[in-house]
Amino acid sequence: MNKRWPLHPKPYDSQLLSDWIKDLAKIYEISYPNFCKRVLMLTSDEIDDLRNSVPERVLTILSNATGIAIDELEGRDMNSKYREWKKEYEEMLARENPKIICL
């Protein structure tokens, strides 16, 4: 899509991208699966996995349509959140007990 969507609220600070996409679908009065298929060009399998992993092309489509920078949309899936939480946890453990080696 080359045109900006007229309605495009930003996602909340800790909102997963899949939940924000559901909000966008509601705003435009289209079902979430249809929004994902027709607007984001996702397959059924990709829609099922959207909570865990967001394809790069979806970030590009959303960024172009909303004007929100890709770096503001990245990292809003469960896989990214898990990596972020794991890193924070390992850093906390290392501060509390520097002899612990985290994998």
Image: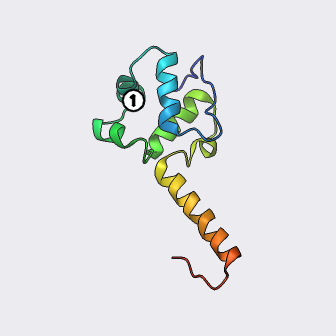
Give the farthest residue toward the front: 96
Determine which quarter of the picture holds residue 70: top right
**In the rendered image, which residue does mark 1 sit on?**
36
The residue at 42%/47% (across/down) is 52
Estimate the x, y position of residue 53 in percent, counting from the top left: 43, 48
Give the farthest residue toward the left: 44
The residue at 29%/41% (across/down) is 45
- Looking at the image, which is closer to me, 65 or 81? 81
Determine which quarter of the picture holds residue 33: top left
**Residue 14 horizontal side relative to residue 59, left or right:** right
- Looking at the image, which is closer to me, 96 or 102? 96
- How crowded pointer 1 is (Cα within 10 Å; few <14, some 14-19, many 20+) is rated as many
Estimate the x, y position of residue 86 in percent, counting from the top left: 55, 63
- Identified by mark 1, the residue type is Cys
Q: How many labels were placed on the picture?
A: 1
Residue 7 lies, with reference to residue 83, above or below; the image says: above
Estimate the x, y position of residue 49 in percent, counting from the top left: 36, 43
Determine which quarter of the picture holds residue 66: top right
Residue 35 lies, with reference to residue 73, above or below; the image says: above
The residue at 63%/25% (across/down) is 9
Estimate the x, y position of residue 47 in percent, counting from the top left: 35, 37
